[in-house]
Amino acid sequence: MDDDFPSKHVSWGGACRLIPSRFPPVELYEPVADQKDREALKALETLTNPRLSPDGGAGDFLRPDDRHVTQPWLVAPFAYLDPEPTLYSDGSYGVCIVAETEKGALAAAVQRREAFMRATAMPPTRLDMRQLVTPVSATLHDITGWQRVGDSTETRRICQKLREQGSYGVLLASPFRVGESTAVLFRPTAMTRATQAKHYCFVWDGSRISGIYDYSDQTEQTFDPATLITTEARVAA
């Protein structure tokens, strides 16, 4: 297998991802502590929370030249490891998956949340999700032309090797939307400062996410997430 993948500079001002959240937002200690004690509790948290530590948040999981990044939203994907292998990691390191567009990010979030909810046999409920706009400006290794659906072992091997070589990440075709791309980032310095954007509600009906609505839409009209998918393939991320 030839690992000499072409490099491509990516500049996506609107790149984004979605994370579980709560709407309206509530500070972590608000329900359990008086206002006068919250700053002290936050200081205590920095001693044990890897994404808040002074060395950049992910310690040994980041390259030395990446440890100056301290924004928690950028550091978190690398600070908390997934105990189970994924398509892009064997579980020993974290990656950050961002979509080129908002619709691509929504489609990816739906797929991941559905997989989790089915695995845990969750009854019908609603899930609050926060959109983070995380602009990407980096040179990535383009593996779009190589992609093989279902070849997870080889994909992980390639990602691990490129990460060890200092790559900022890989670029590949979106598994959900024709003509769009997804970036799998290995380093937080591939992104510029993240900003919070919209809050969404995912409606889980017990078997699938059957509807989505934007909290900023006062009508609370839902739309079917299936309309986000413009490809036939649904590749687990």
Image (spheres, rainbow, N blue to C red):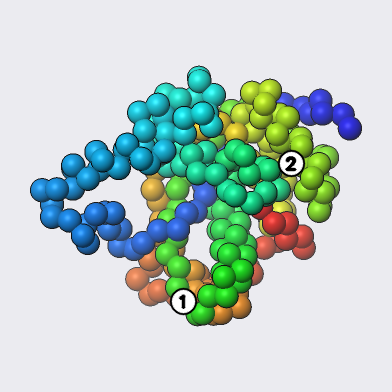
Q: Which residue is mark 2?
A: 156
Q: Nearer the viewer, mark 2 or mark 1?
A: 2
- Residue 195 location (% of width, % of height): 39, 43
Q: Residues within 10 Å of mark 1 (few under 14, many from 20)?
A: few
Residue 68 coordinates in the image, percent (x, y): 42, 24
Q: Residue at x 21, y 60 (%)?
A: 32
Identity, as a three-letter code, of the amino acid under mark 2: Arg
Q: Of helix, strand and loop, which one carries label 1?
A: strand
Residue nearest the observer in this picture, 51 or 219: 51
Q: Nearer the viewer, residue 151 or 79?
A: 79
Q: Which mark is residue 125?
A: 1
From the top left corner, tell me how far across and down residue 233 is, in percent: 77, 60
Identify the residue at horizontal 49%, vertical 69% (top origin).
202
Residue 134 visible in the picture: no
Tag 1: residue type? Thr
Label 2 with label 1: CB-CB less than 8 Å: no
Answer above or below: position of 96 versus 61: below
- Furthest toward the right, the residue is 1
Q: Quadrant of residue 12?
A: top right
Nearer-the-camera pick, 31 or 224: 31
